[in-house]
Amino acid sequence: MTHPEFDAPEPPAEVSASSLLDALGRPLHDLRISVTDRCNFRCRYCMPKEVFGPDFAFLPRSEVLAFEEITRVARLFAERGVRKLRLTGGEPTLRAQLPSLVAMLREVPDVDIAMTTNGTMLRALAQPLADAGLDRVTVSLDSLDDPTFRAMNDMDFPVALVLEGIAAAERAGLAPVKVNAVVRRGVNDHTVLALAEHFRGTPHIVRFIEFMDVGTTNGWQMDEVVPASALVAAIDARFPLEPVEANYTGEVAQRYRYRDGAGEVGFITSVTQPFCSTCTRARLSAEGGLYTCLFAGEGTDLRGPLRAGATDADLGAIIDGTWRARTDRYSELRTAQTPGSRKRVEMSYIGG
Ligand code: SAM
Ligand code: SF4
Ligand code: SF4
């Protein structure tokens, strides 16, 4: 497979001379912060029960970064050009006192703060999180068909409560909500049109995500990936679509709008049309590992130095060195044979 667009990388327009660039010329713009490795769902594509069962050893509390530690790291990233922080997990809303963390992160200058959640706790938490300074939420919802959704989260959790969570986010001023749906052939692909139709005419934006081979436990097979191009064609046939320009370089979703003005949908084509050449994201695991790719096998430890009294300059040098050395482009190099061939961290550990 060749990647001509990668052979001669053009720096994105917004890269300034002072930007921290990786080895392939990509700037650092986003930091995804996993605040817990735990979750109340067992989505089969992410944390299958057979692996993440009652005996699974989640991180003990002492190994998880404290809010002060997370905020310090976030500030150092912001000083290096990061403008977007995204709280994720595991399920971020399971972390006790999450609004307090958001309030602390709000003190970091010039950052947008978002969260990706399964939505189950939003009925109670949307308002406190918005009051603390959260800007936006993405809610994962793979199907509106209740039996399909219950099977996918594998905890028999009903759709209705997630929809109530989305409504709570809207009331709290966190709209437009992005709704993430992972599509798996033969599992929920028959419910894609209904999901698109439900959110047509609302400010919310459904983003269909190709099933990815993250981690090593979800039994990924290429033939379970429904190419985004097929989804675009299926939705376009029922509700005509037209493409929309990306908001910014590095935006992961391909955007389309309904020709009749009923809103937008997005497609995250990580498998069939990878976007590594514009990937500007770093990830901080719950225990303070810095990962430069969703498919990384190893992270760079920040917790050790943080707890050993490292100065901001020391920590900054580790971050700079890690980003400058970055050559990740896993999705561009993926082949159908890739799974199983190398160690990869689980998505629930570093967040999506
Ligand atoms: N628990 C939160 C949630 O589900 O929104 C945040 C963490 S979850 C790991 C982040 C995102 O990754 C979710 O939208 C989820 O659907 C997506 N995801 C997890 N496993 C995936 C996979 N194998 N392929 C594609 N997306 C996946
Ligand atoms: Fe939990 Fe999110 Fe993974 Fe589902 S996708 S198991 S909700 S972390
Ligand atoms: Fe970024 Fe890695 Fe995903 Fe490529 S595979 S887009 S480098 S996270």
Image (spheres, rainbow, N blue to C red):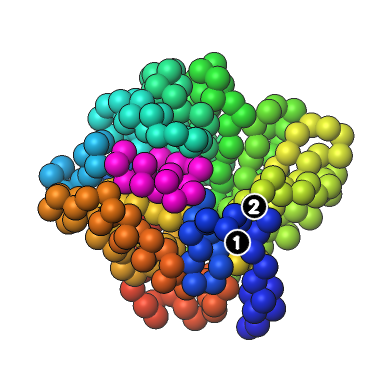
The location of residue 190, given as percent across then percent down, is 64, 49
- What amino acid is found at the position of numbered circle 1 in the picture? Thr
Q: Residue at x 57, y 58 (%)?
A: 17
The location of residue 62, given as percent across then percent down, is 13, 44
Q: Is residue 41 left or right of residue 110?
A: left
Residue placed most toward the observer, 286 or 166: 286
Residue placed most toward the observer, 181 or 298: 298
In the figure, 15 relative to 274: above or below?
Answer: above
Q: Residues within 10 Å of mark 2 (few under 14, many from 20)?
A: few
The location of residue 258, given as percent across then percent down, is 81, 39
Q: Residues within 10 Å of mark 1 (few under 14, many from 20)?
A: many
Mark-to-mark CA distance, 1 and 2: 12 Å
Tell me where residue 13 sits by quadrant: bottom right
Residue indicated by mark 1: 278
Q: Is residue 175 left or right of residue 317?
A: right
Q: Residue at x 64, y 71 (%)?
A: 9
In the figure, 224 relative to 82: above or below?
Answer: below
- What amino acid is found at the position of numbered circle 2 in the picture? Glu
Q: Quadrant of the N terminus?
A: bottom right
Please indicate, yes or no, whether residue 267 appears anywhere in the rendered image. no
Residue indicated by mark 2: 14
Element on which disc 1 rests: helix
Q: The magenta stretch spans which residues?
A: 71-87
Q: Is residue 300 left or right of residue 138?
A: left
Element on which disc 2 rests: loop
Please indicate, yes or no, whether residue 83 appears anywhere in the rendered image. yes
